Structures are given as structure tokens and as C-alpha cells.
Image (cartoon, rainbow, N blue to C red):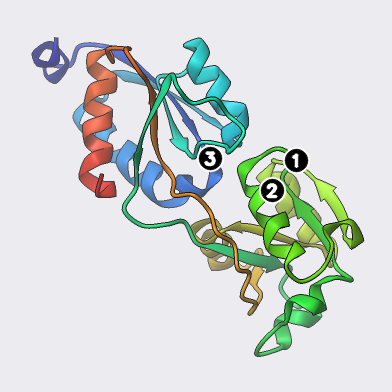
Amino acid sequence: EIAELAKGALGFVRIGSVVGTVPSLLTSRLLSFNKVHPRVRISIDVATSDTLLPLLIRGDLDLVLGRLPDQLDNQDLIIDFFEHPERMSVIARPGHKLAKKKKVGLSELTTQTWILHPVGSPMRLRVEAALKRNFSSSMLNIVETSSLLATTSLIEASDMISVVPYDVAMHYSKYGLVTILPVDLPISLVNLGVITRKGKTPAPAVTEFLRCLNDFSGL
């Protein structure tokens, strides 16, 4: 079947991904895979890990680029961790008053309106844990969304701030849509990785895509 795939046979790969892997790892590997296997259908769902993993367990996805939430019973899943931990950045609109400073303390962020993932997502849990070391998250004005479009639109039109993966922040700052605030947010995130189901033999196209991921991510 692998040989047939190499000859151009059709296949289908259903990918779930958190937003942080999209600008770099997923985009790079998908383009490389598509050059070699142009007839393989690929679908991509971008959401938080806690949303994607039930789809993987149910069989609606073949793999997820994400992390295992602390509260999830993961006995049916396998994760191959990426070599490097994910970095996070605090972003705001260009021209935000805090962007003019050389250094921003966490205490200066208490009066800002935050855009955060919904309660229960791994990133939300870690962000709140980091903030609670300095002040109560109940003090914050929070807008909840997992939509990156909603996040960037709100930031563009206001003085709201948000926490996003570093690669995402760099992608949007490159086009002048956001600025990265000079603040150290001590977030301890579990490494991202490629998550698949135990006991499930991947289809040939999925196997080839997993191999393509491994070549890039240092798994």
C-alpha cells in the first residue's frame, strides 16, 4: 500500500492541530507532503486540545498536534513529544501604551482586558496558574474565545491583550497586525506532540504524513 501511495494512489489524512503548530511545523510539513503525494486528501481542524482529542478518540481524526490536558483520561492515546517546549507571548495592538515600554511587569497587566481560551483548555489552565502567582485571576476582565480571528480582530479594535504561541505572535507581528509586549509570563506548558490512538494501525497516507512530521520535529 505504501508503494501504491508513492505511485500517486489516493489517500486521506485527517489532522487536528492547536493553533501554535500551524504557522511553522504544520505548514512546512504539509507543503512538503503535498509535493510528494499531491493526490492525497488532507483535512485540517484547528482548535484547542480538549476539543480535538475527543474527535481523535472517536475516530473522526487520524492524529492531533497538541498536548494532553491534565484532566483527560489518556489511556487510549499515545503522544510523541516534540523536542522543544512551546514558547508563549503576550500580544496587543500596535501602538498600545504598554508596547512603548522596554519592560512590562505582570502587575501592569491587571487593568487590561484579557482574551483567553475557554475554561478547561490546557493553555487557559496554565495561563491562570501563572497569573495566580502574582494576582488573582478573578480580578481580571476576561473575554473567552478559542478563535484566532476573533482574538486578532478584538486586539486590532481595542486595547485588549492576549496570550498566544510565540510562532503565532511572530506570524501576525510580521504583518503589523499585533505587537509582542515585553513581558515575561512564567507559563509552564507541557510539550506539544503528535497524538494518535493506541491499537489503531494508521492508513498508509497517515503513516507517510507521520514520517514527514518526524523528519521535521525531532521526534
Nearer the camera: disc 1 or disc 3: 1
Task: Look at the numbered disc 2 and give the secondary structure of its residue.
Answer: helix
Q: Nearer the viewer, residue 169 or 31?
A: 169
Identified at 69% across, 57% down, the residue is 129
**Are discs 1 and 3 less than 8 Å apart at CB?**
no
Q: Quadrant of the N terminus?
A: top left
Identity, as a three-letter code, of the amino acid under mark 1? Pro
Residue 210 pos. (x, y %): 27, 30
Mark 2 — residue? Answer: 124
| Structural distance between the alpha carbons of marks 3 and 2 | 13 Å
Q: Position of residue 71 (x, y in %)?
A: 62, 33
On screen, residue 206 versus residue 145, left or right, reads: left
Q: Which mark is residue 118?
A: 1
Return the residue found at the far bottom.
Answer: 102
Q: Which mark is residue 2?
A: none
Estimate the x, y position of residue 59 in percent, counting from the top left.
47, 11
Q: Residues within 10 Å of mark 3 (few under 14, many from 20)?
A: many
Residue drawn at x 74%, y 64% as measured from the top left: 131
Cβ atoms at labels 2 and 1 below 8 Å apart: yes
Helix, strand or loop status at disc 3: loop
